[in-house]
Image (tube, rainbow, N blue to C red):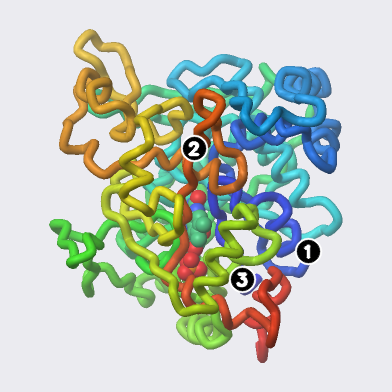
Amino acid sequence: MVIIQGGMGVGISNWRLAQTVSALGQLGVVSGTALDQVLARRLQMGDPGGHMRRALDAFPVRDLADGIYERYYIPDGKSRREAFPTVPMPTATPSAEWQALVMVANFVEVFLAREGHTNPVGINFLEKIQTPHLPSIYGAMLAGVDYVLMGAGIPMKIPGVLDRFARHEPATYPLTVSGGDPVLLSFDPREFVGDGLAPLTRPKFLAIIASDVLALTLARRANGAVDGFIVEGPTAGGHNAPPRGALQVNDRGEPIYGPRDVVNLEKLKALGLPFWLAGGAGTADRVREALAAGAAGVQVGTAFAMCAESGLRDDLRQTLLAQVRDGAVDVVTNAVASPTGFPFKVATVADSLSEAGVLAARPRICDLGYLREAYRDDDGTVGFRCPSEPVNVYVAKGGDRVETTGRACICNALLATVGMPQMRAGKIEEPPIVTMGDDLSGVGRFLRPGATDYTAADVIASLTAGL
Ligand SMILES: Cc1cc2nc3c(=O)[nH]c(=O)nc-3n(C[C@H](O)[C@H](O)[C@H](O)COP(=O)(O)O)c2cc1C
């Protein structure tokens, strides 16, 4: 496949977008981020269309799937003013209930993306969000996922997990712990699905990288096969790799990238593995250039995030499309907003966290916890902290106050961006945050004359024209 539709969390590249792209013969990729919340909230919203129920019915262990349905499903959906009932937060010693929810949620998303066609489907994870990795990957594999794509970290130990889960064997993953040794997370499939399932297909593993040195390290030292690379440049939507060396920013506070940040494609080619170029690659010219440079194709995000099948809340999408038509798009590479510490691209949208006033007005609450960092306490126990949580709480956990400045709770905000905002005190809705790449200003090229919207098929037709 020449085009990979990039994984976009939370819930932007949902099963519907990925299914559409894969059915059209390119690689559709669902986001695997926070799918436990996404499944629970879809059920709490009454499961419009019955898609969750249909996918749950296909899960190999019916009791497990039924238990989740009964726990979270609200007939006709919760009222808008009601809060979403909570889901347990990820920890180093997760309950069986949470692991089952994560596993089943990943199964559901991949199952639905694979319906109605026989083409490959991928799932995307961020390495930094480590606690859900094992049940997520196993759940996606149970549904027959063909590709696992992972960036935002160094996924050295993921390929081996894929090998073990293909045989339904238990696997471990080292959770990074600040100020101490890693803690081994473990997951034994047989505790959830029993014995007797046929071996699974081992998905191909594509690592998302921004450095040929990292690609080389992964190819040589990962604990199993790396099957290819996505080379992502700093114009891409979502999180970006930080620039090499000391951070320098321009007058908008955006990180400045230099020649050292450019990936050496010749060195990458020497590894002999396929690679796709990402970041502003959504035009037929860029596709041709990528192929001429030896790439297998491109990975495209922003163009798909803005199409009709995307999970992006429709009013936000329409606002952005109007900005595109008016030439009024503004995308900022925010060096501090994301608690990960990675630069994060943020589109300027009214009433979202791109506005300083909206960010300042939001009380600091951390109740989702995906981006929390594990740390070793003085007494040796492992705790979790996030620089977006209340400052005094973060500092009491040994966090540096400086780290808290300008941080946004992107866990809550990104769920709001796909129409699943938590409600506070029955009246305040969590504000959204929209991440888009620099390519946002150019997506008008997919609009047919007189049209105000476009589809994934329009993007694919435009990118593959003349191939
Ligand atoms: C809304 C949005 C969310 C994204 N979320 C993720 C993500 O969760 N994981 C990831 O690896 N990349 C993420 N990305 C990056 C895309 O997968 C893709 O690599 C990138 O968008 C390509 O550059 P482009 O935006 O210029 O097309 C995201 C991009 C966008 C636009």
Q: Amino acid at mark 1?
A: Ala
Give SS at disc 1: helix
Q: Earlier in the sequence, mark 1 or mark 2?
A: 1
In the picture as drawn, the residue positioned furthest to the front comes out as 427
Q: Residue at x 70, y 36 (%)?
A: 42
Q: Amino acid at mark 2?
A: Glu
Q: Earlier in the sequence, mark 2 or mark 3?
A: 3
Q: Residue at x 56, y 15 (%)?
A: 95
Quarter where residue 308 is shown: bottom right
> Is 375 placed left or right of 270 in the picture?
left
- The verdict on label 3 being within 8 Å of ligand 1 is no
Q: Is residue 221 above or below residue 6?
A: above
Quarter where residue 422 is shown: top right
Q: Residue at x 55, y 76 (%)?
A: 443
Q: Distance of mark 1 from mark 2, alpha carbons?
A: 34 Å
Q: Nearer the viewer, residue 180 or 447?
A: 447
Q: Which residue is mark 3?
A: 3
Q: Which residue is mark 2?
A: 430
Q: Amino acid at mark 3?
A: Ile
Q: Earlier in the sequence, mark 1 or mark 3?
A: 3
Q: Which residue is mark 1?
A: 23
Q: Nearer the viewer, residue 406 or 370?
A: 406
Quarter where residue 260 is shown: bottom left
In the picture as drawn, the residue positioned furthest to the bottom comes out as 466
Please state the horizontal and vertical placement of residue 118, each as a whole percent of the image.
82, 58
In the picture as drawn, the residue positioned furthest to the top comes out as 379
> Is 263 placed left or right of 313 in the picture?
left
Please state the horizontal and vertical placement of residue 354, each as a whole percent of the image.
38, 53
Dot 3: within a 10 Å radius of its alpha carbon, few (fewer than 14), some, or many (20 or more) residues?
A: many
